[in-house]
Amino acid sequence: MASTYVLLVFIWATTPLAIVWSVSDL
């Protein structure tokens, strides 16, 4: 349970960063 929660939080936190990184790469 806890590991799944941590994984979801990790994805939620890093997805915006990945989007910003992709946009800035353009």
Image (cartoon, grey):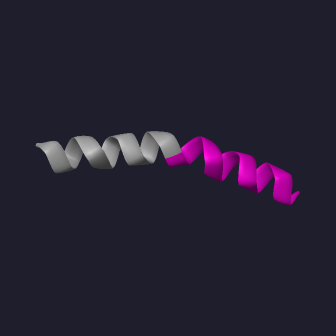
Is 12 above or below relative to 14? above
Please tell me whether residue 22 belongs to the stretch shown in magenta: yes
At horizontal 31% and vertical 49% (from top left) the residue drawn is 7
Left or right: where 2 falls relative to 21: left
Left or right: where 18 falls relative to 24: left
Q: Position of residue 15 (x, y in %)?
A: 55, 46
Quadrant of the image containing the N terminus: top left
At horizontal 28% and vertical 45% (from top left) the residue drawn is 6
Left or right: where 13 falls relative to 17: left
Quadrant of the image containing the C terminus: bottom right
Q: Give the magenta part as a residue range.
A: 14-26
At horizontal 37% and vertical 40% (from top left) the residue drawn is 9
Q: Position of residue 19 (x, y in %)?
A: 68, 47
Q: Position of residue 20 (x, y in %)?
A: 73, 46
Q: Residue furthest right?
A: 26
Kindly report the secondary structure that dominates the magenta region of the rendered protein. Answer: helix
Q: Residue furthest left?
A: 1
Left or right: where 7 falls relative to 19: left
Q: Position of residue 5 (x, y in %)?
A: 24, 40
At horizontal 33% and vertical 42% (from top left) the residue drawn is 8
How many tags in the picture?
0
